[in-house]
Image (spheres, rainbow, N blue to C red):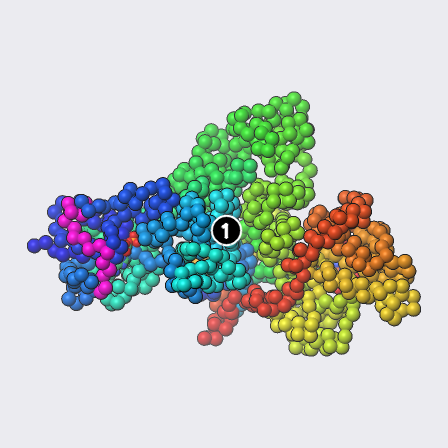
Amino acid sequence: MNWLDIGAVDDIPLRGARIVKTKVGCVAVFRTAEAEIFAASNTCPHKGGPLAEGIVHGQKVTCPLHNWVFDLNTGEAQGADEGRIATYPVRIDDGRILLDATDLMAQRAA
Amino acid sequence: MKKNLVIIGAGMASGRLLEHLTDAQGADWDVTLFNAEPRGNYNRIMLSPVLSGDKTYDEIVTHDDDWYAERGVTCRFGERVTGIDRAAKIVRAPNGDVAYDKLVLGTGSDPFIIPLPGHDLDGVIAYRDLEDTEKMMGMGAGKRVVVIGGGLLGLEAAAGMAARGADVTVVHIMGHLMERQLDEAAGYLLKTSLEGKGISIRLLANSQAILGENGHVRALQLDTGEELPCDLLVMAVGIRPSVALAKEAGLAVGRGVHVDDQLVTSDADVLAVGECVEHDGAVFGLVAPLYDQAKVAAQTLMGEDASFVQKSLSTKLKVTGCDLFSAGDFAEGEGREDIVFRDPSRGVYKRLVIKDNVVVGAVMYGDTADGNWFFGLIKDKTDISDMRETLIFGPAFQGGSPADPLSAVAALPLDAEICGCNGICKGTIVDAITAGSTELGAVRATTKASASCGTCTGLVEQLLEVTLGDEYAAPENAAICGCTDLSHEDVRRLIKTKELKSQPAVWQELGWTTPNGCHVCRPAVNFYLLADWPVEYQDDPQSRFINERKHANIQKDGTFSVVPRMWGGITNANELRAIADAADKYNVPTVKVTGGQRIDLLGVKGEDLPAMWADLNRAGLVSGHAYSKGLRTVKTCVGTDHCRFGTQDSTGLGIKLERALWGSWTPHKVKLGVSGCPRNCAEATCKDVGIVCVDSGYQIGVGGAAGMDLKEIERLCEVETEQEAMDVVIAFTQLYRENAKYLDRMYKWIAKVGLDWAKERVVDDLEERAALVERFELSQSIYRRDPWADEAKKAQQKYTPLADLTLEAAE
Ligand code: SRM
Ligand SMILES: Cc1cc2nc3c(=O)[nH]c(=O)nc-3n(C[C@H](O)[C@H](O)[C@H](O)COP(=O)(O)OP(=O)(O)OC[C@H]3O[C@@H](n4cnc5c(N)ncnc54)[C@H](O)[C@@H]3O)c2cc1C
Ligand code: SF4
Ligand code: FES
């Protein structure tokens, strides 16, 4: 595990999201409740919609382009749609968001 | 020879330590106990009952003078220790120093005081000790108090003083009360119940300064400039471990005084217990773990082997006079699932959080009878897979064959009330069903059950299902979405009649089955609330589709398009230059003239939006709302200004209408057209509202469209003056805002209510017309503003990435 402090919980609006740019593409960081954060790929497997721009409800997000819904726990598309987004471990420590960057910094420059 | 033990702080933790130590056989200590407060150990957590008058101070004293005397404890109360000399092993105090062999720190916490201007005024207090409590007890009828902080302590303080008749206002920075322990729905119920006790609650309120007069507090000023007058101001915004003494003595200190598993600090002869310690990264704020610490510390002092272990903590909460229960954990974590139960008629809300078939959290409001049972499930990590379907109904429904979700309804006794509005119980409904009322409408007609507010519709349907079995055909679902059984029309009606003014109020009172809705219902509910309560309700951007949240249209590649407003299609060289400059500066790939008489800049990067808007704003250009369910464009023709056929100033009227209507939110988008003569060059006859100017005045038509359906407008009326034309259009728009279903264009709504119904209100009834205009203006006093200017100023951060890890890699 390689926990990186990426910002404060309060930097993300409740039931909103912000993105983190990484070497392997944008990661969307979702705030589903006062102190509940999820991180997942920002890119919808349907047609690449930016998931951080979607409506966040419960522990799910709806893609802004064509309304696919993803469960942020598993990354699985819900209902009849088939697809999955990568999810990344996150935790909260004293109001700060820590993201496990092990998979995200894989291509770290030498 | 007896050894000297000095204890600094007579608090809940050190008090317990003393009990363990002096109870033990052969304890061999000369104990000196210092306390800054002029008294010994008392039960701090019972201060609230003292405040509210339910208990006296004497009743909460845990150790009295006799107790200390019996156990030979030397008391130095009212004396604050000023220093520790670890080399000489001496504690320094005003009335004489004391030498120690072992020292215990039990200094507790200091309440956090926000360093607002005026925080040191007389009459600004925290809530920590008996002195604070006594000051609050002086607040009775005729006194005004402001409490900053809507957490447990702040609300206890508020409830206590309100019980004494004081006029109390709670100022809380977050969107709901006790946000750490409660979710929004329970927070909403708590707020309602506190308001019922006469406490006024100000959410999302930022304190700016404390104002005084002759050195005494006079009012709290919010960042809006508003002043809340008060005789006493209580700050209950958090605590910090009290570490100053330890730090000065050179002990290892982080957030609290560092201790190991034996509660020994970085000095082998100094121990620490209670809220002042930090153990394995954690600090503490509730008594349960402190008692464990006290026991271990006592054992350490007696030379016994013991270790303090942090338990996964479940907290139970209670606010004076509110039936509230919260246990376990809602924060962080993946793989969680919610079970929500609401009974709006009784004001009951229950929510369980499940992870891996184990209950990890429970929030309950209004009916907490099963609280301890759930608390047990959490503590014991009971596997609940077998009782999942009926779990939320509590222990009474467990056992037997619970697999069927309908069994809960089936298990209800016949005299259980189903419809709270009409007082109809299960037996009556079942009788009606067996007597032939086999669908919802018939049950409503025969029993009146679910015929009033309709929130028990789900239960009645389940009864139909239970009673009729396979014979029951569920009705066609007109519900908004899976979160509720109610239709758009029902929700709109209930928001008005029940005066629901927040989303949590809607979720709770109307029995939503999800914690906070979904992408289908949230935008609709958000619109209904702001249309019906423009002043009271605060728009929620997170319940809006991305376009309305970022004030631009999202493109298929995730970029955005930017369409500035061109009032009535009129522009000038200055504006065009600003648009051209912006196109250059932000590398806009496509510049297009739209079908709505203005210019679209397509392909703008999300993070460039605020800067681009600021540039456009400087040239006087504002948002064209090309993205909103609101006023889009007012298309005009050149009219009398230039055209040889023009009968009235169509351009001028178009601009006036656009200026009046812009910024308003509507059920779906609204487009207007104003043509100067029946040649109709502005295509007014296929707009939501179309005006065709004629010699005698203005022909106003409504309900046109040229999108998926092609519709010609229908004539609403003809008026003589421009002012009348404005009033009619505004009143009609407001009628649409107040009544239509979200995402019905005007023509669809008119088809439902009938044009005559609208005419009666807007054309015939002049009083109603004026009232509609007035309500529209009230709403526009809040919404008639340029979102681009607002966003460019204050909300920049939501357009930029939270972090950029690509840079990190370069070291
Ligand atoms: C930019 C523009 C096309 C153009 O290049 O001219 C346009 C672009 C879009 N229109 Fe339109 N409409 C545009 C004029 C029209 C017109 C013509 C008009 O307004 O005079 C119509 C038919 C008239 C009408 O509305 O009745 C029109 C009928 C629609 C419809 C169908 C609405 C309906 O109720 O049937 C949609 C879909 C919807 O709103 O649900 C739509 C939706 C859209 C959306 C917002 C699709 C979307 O949701 O992403 C398009 C955004 C494109 C983008 O990425 O920016 N657009 N759209 C026009 C912007 C006008 C403006 O200045 O604001
Ligand atoms: C109103 C209220 C309600 C609460 N309700 C609950 C509840 O329902 N459940 C729950 O679990 N917890 C509750 N708490 C929290 C609980 O009271 C604390 O966790 C607990 O009291 C901490 O114990 P402690 O011994 O660490 O510190 P304290 O009890 O604060 O004792 C510390 C003592 O040290 C003294 N002191 C500090 N510095 C010096 C010095 N230099 N020299 C001499 N003396 C010093 C202080 O004056 C104080 O008397 C409540 C707290 C308050 C204020
Ligand atoms: S007509 Fe269709 S493709 Fe063209 S802008 Fe409108 S919505 Fe997009
Ligand atoms: S791109 Fe996400 S649903 Fe189509």
Kind of residue at disc 1: Ile
Q: Quadrant of the N terminus of chain A?
A: bottom left
Give, as a single range, the part of the protein colored magenta: B67-83
Q: Residue at x 48, y 75 (%)?
A: B810
Above or below, comparing residue B439 to residue B350 in the picture: above
- Dividing the image into four quarters, tell me where ligand 1 lies: bottom right
Horizontal arrangement in the rendering, residue A53 relative to residue B715 (left or right): left
Badge 1 sits on which subunit? B
Residue B73: horizontal and vertical position, in percent?
Answer: 16, 50
Residue at 84% of width from left, 64% of height from top? B650
Q: Is mark 1 within 8 Å of ligand 2?
A: no
> Is residue A38 found left or right of B733 in the rendered image?
left
Quadrant of res B669 = bottom right
Image coords of residue B681 (percent x, y)? 87, 63
Residue B309 sits above or below residue B93 on the image: above
Number of residues whose C-alpha sits closer than 10 Å to that of mark 1, classed few (under 14), some (14–19) or many (20 or more): many
Reply above or below: B154 against B560. above
Looking at the image, which residue is at 40% across and 60% down? B216
Mark 1 secondary-structure assignment: strand
Q: Nearer the viewer, residue B54 or B563?
A: B54
Q: Which residue is mark 1?
A: B201
**Is residue B220 shown to the viewer in this render?**
yes
Quadrant of the image occupied by residue B624: bottom right
Q: Residue furthest left?
A: B1
Q: Which is nearer the eye, A3 or B293?
A: B293
The quadrant holding residue B433 is top right
Counting labels gives 1
Q: Position of residue B365 (x, y in %)?
A: 47, 41
Q: Residue at x 36, y 43 (%)?
A: B53
